[in-house]
Amino acid sequence: MNTIVSRITHTTEDEEIIKIAGEIIKKGGLVAFPTETVYGLGGDALNPDSSRKIYAAKGRPSDNPLIVHICKLEDINRIVSDFPDKAKRLADEFWPGPLTMVLPKSNTVPKETTGGLDTVAVRMPVDPIALSFIEAAGGYVAAPSANLSGKPSPTSSRYVEEDMNGRIDMIIDGGDVEIGLESTIVDMTGETPVLLRPGRITLEMLQEVLGKVDADKTILAGNAAGRPKAPGMKYKHYAPKGELTIVSGEREAVVERMNELAKQGMLKGEKVGIIGTEENIPFYCGDSIKSVGKRDDEVSIAKRLYRILREFDDENVTLIYSEAFSTGGMGQAIMNRLLKAAGHQVLHV
Ligand code: TXA
Ligand code: MG
């Protein structure tokens, strides 16, 4: 398959690109598109064949449900059988934006899209390209992140091309994304909302609107804490090629231990990558040392994390050591992704 790559130029030409992309979706094809979180791999959410194609293009198990993206609040009524008051309040506060809500699905949504579940995950993104694309596509776009299964979610169209060239009909290139980690997912089907996947909308922000919100125990503890509720969370999702270990503790002890481990690795012929905060970068040794941002600037750390993991893959790094981050606010999302990528290998020093 020949994949068209169309770059958004913020001129009137964009309208034509969006129109073509929308038509591809309506005909049952697949288009990757930018959102504020990560790039999505879109298909018609109401067409079971499109969902099947999405799983095939990603190499993803088909019991892992897709998020349905909408562009207008009223459109939700066609795809959910209930839109409870608490969900409406979150929508008022955070939509359009990086929040996904799990709700009971209506019969209009095929089981292929929801991985066989009776619930559907819905999100209204804020990225203007995403919104106009969803509208042109008929209003309901099923989209997982536009990476091959097992790779970090793509934060720029370059990585979408790497993974999806030849596998889908079109890529809309909108440059680098804003946030860099996937949306926050909240299950709204029970009495108390449950945070399934942390993101830019933090647990604290949800609690501010709704009061009580629980958090899935597996977010930071891993599968040892039970069975994760978002089916996708059970797969080892964000794994880099190199073996990643997180080193946690006081600043100086962490730098010292990471340097020891890096030297040992290099002596054995490993190619060692380091993920550190800007403050510590001058003190590290390793083959490839990368700054993930300032320790107190979680937004910038979130934005760089997946890019760094991809760069280590490209550089064929075989061992990676990373600092740990605080787990409050958006730090919860950062540590959730980092712990997954590390298969929960943490060294406390
Ligand atoms: O930011 C995002 O959410 C991006 C962009 C493209 O919108 N999308 C994304 O999709 O991250 P994906 O497929 O990579 O992750 C969706 C997650 C999976 O872990 C899946 O298991 C969970 O959402 N999910 C989807 N439907 C669900 C449902 N009905 N119940 C529970 N979890 C669900
Ligand atoms: Mg994904």
Image (cartoon, grey):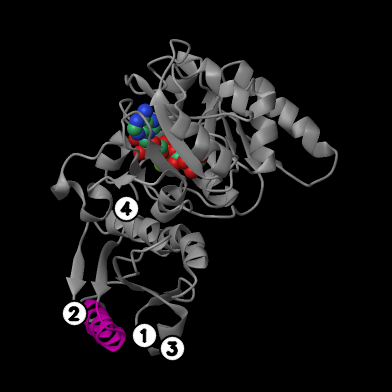
Q: Which residue is mark 3?
A: 282
Say which quarter of the image contains residue 149: top left
Residue 349, horizontal then vertical, whole percent: 18, 79
The quadrant of the rendered image in which ligand 2 is seen is: top left
Cα gap from disc 4 to disc 3, whole angstroms: 27 Å
Which range of residues does the magenta coloring cover? 249-265
Is 81 situated above or below 172?
Answer: above
Label 4 vs 3, first from the N-terminus: 4
Label 3 Cα neighbours within 10 Å, binned few <14 / some 14-19 / many ≥20: few
Q: Contact (CB < 8 A) between labels 2 and 4?
A: no
Residue 37 in the image, given as x and y percentages of width and height: 53, 48
Mark 2 closeness class: few <14, some 14–19, many ≥20 residues within 10 Å: some
Q: Main secondary structure of the magenta part?
A: helix
* Residue type highlighted by circle 4: Ala
Q: Which of the 4 image quadrants contains residue 213?
A: top left
Secondary structure beneath dot 4 equals loop
Q: CA distance from mark 1 to mark 2?
A: 16 Å
Residue carrying label 1? 284
Instruction: Tell me the SS state at disc 1.
Output: loop
Of callouts 2 and 4, the N-terminal one: 4
Q: Which residue is mark 4?
A: 239
> Where residue 239 sits: x, y (%)?
32, 52
Marks 2 & 3, CB-CB < 8 Å contact: no
Which of the two residues, 217 or 28, is positioned nearer the viewer here? 217
Mark drawn on residue 349: 2
Q: For marks 2 and 3, give the one nearer the viewer.
A: 2
User: Is label 2 in a helix, a strand or a loop?
Assistant: loop
Residue appearing at x 35%, y 28% in the figure: 189
Q: Residue furthest front?
A: 211
Mark 1 vs mark 2, foreground winner is 2
